[in-house]
Amino acid sequence: MNIMRHRIATLAAALALATTTAHAQQPHRHDTPAPEPAPKTAPTVDHSAMNHSTMDHSTMDHSVMEHGDMKHGGMDHGGMDHAAMDHAKHETDAAQAPRTPIPPITDADRAAARAPAHGHDHGDRVVGTLLFDRFEAWNDHGGGQAWEAQGWIGTDAHKLWLRSEGEREDGRTAAADIELLYGRPLARWWDVVAGVRHETRPGPARTAAALGVIGVAPYKFEVEATGYLDASGRLSAQVEAEYDVLLTNRLILQPLIEAEWHARDDRDRGIGAGLSTIEAGVRLRYEITRRFAPYVGIVHERSFGDTADLRRDEGEAAEDTRVVAGLRFWF
């Protein structure tokens, strides 16, 4: 009997264990809510090792950029190490920076860049030129010839000038002079000159001391102004200005004006005190070469004051207009 009871208890325990195991292995019912999956954690990107200079931004999908939490295509910039980023802009700036530092400007550099005070650049080299600005003739009133020439030789700091001007009428010399002058730079484009002039006109020849300036005024007017004092104490002055107007590269129009002034009468030469004469002309030249140019022009001369009266007393006209033709050349 006891053995029977023990077997029945053992069978019941085995049945209960089988029932429990079968229930545990049954699938879940559909009405039982499934557990939520664990949130996916974005992989941590180590931007400290990223080289943005080689990053191809053209292939990045910016459509998924979420500006609220700074996510670019799933890239979490919250943990980005900006201190170690290698930006392309920094590399560009470094490439454009000069490899050799520019040295500071010194006083010697400034002195070398400064133009000479007198406007020339020959230094101590000796150079020279001779220009016949006017070498002309006319047929009006018996005809005549005139010339005006000047030349110089020397350096930028020291020049020896030679000037000559004169006229011939009816086969005789109406006026002629020659000047020998020493020149020094006075300012940019200007020289001061001093020397002597020997003058030949009807009557006795005269020699006078000369002092003046030669240069280029604003707007490129070439100016010569000279004062003279002879042995008799006669003081006079002469001023000449001319300007070149380029009509073409070779066709040039040259207006010119010249005035003479005397401190006192010189009746032996028909000159009165004050402003004696003004000569104004315009010449049109064609430069076959820069050194050789024929020209035509018209010249008007007028006397003033006592000079005009003395000329009338001698049977001469107080003013005169003539058409001229000539050559301009230099070497």
Image (cartoon, helix red, strand yellow):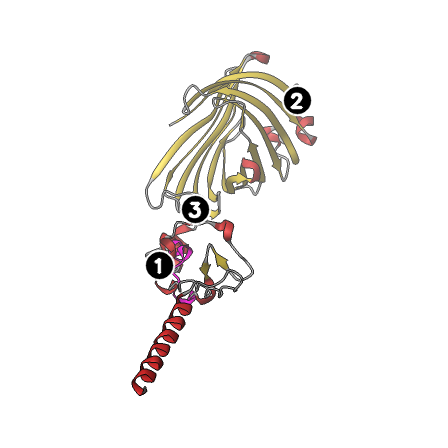
Which quadrant of the figure has residue 93? Answer: bottom left
Q: Are marks 2 and 3 in contact (CB under 8 Å)?
A: no
For the residue pair 21 and 316, the one nearer the viewer reads as 21
Query: In which quadrant will I find the N terminus?
Result: bottom left
**Residue visible at 69% across and 27% down in the picture:** 309
For the residue pair 311 and 46, the one nearer the viewer reads as 46
**What segment carries the magenta color?**
81-93
Residue labelled with disc 3: 58
Under mark 3, the amino acid is Ser
Magenta run includes residue 39:
no
Magenta run includes residue 89:
yes
Under mark 2, the amino acid is Glu
Which of label 2 and label 3 is nearer to you?
Answer: 3
Instruction: Give the mark nearest the N terminus, 1 or 2.
Output: 1
Identify the secondary structure beneath mark 1: loop
The tag on residue 101 is 1
For the residue pair 282 and 301, the one nearer the viewer reads as 282
Instruction: Give the mark nearest the N terminus, 3 or 1.
Output: 3
**How far across and down, in percent of the image, does residue 233 sit?**
57, 43
Residue labelled with disc 2: 319
Which of label 3 and label 1 is nearer to you?
Answer: 3
Q: On the rendered structure, is 192 left or right of 298? A: left
Say if 235 sits above or below 308 in the image: below
**Residue visible at 60% across and 33% down in the picture:** 260
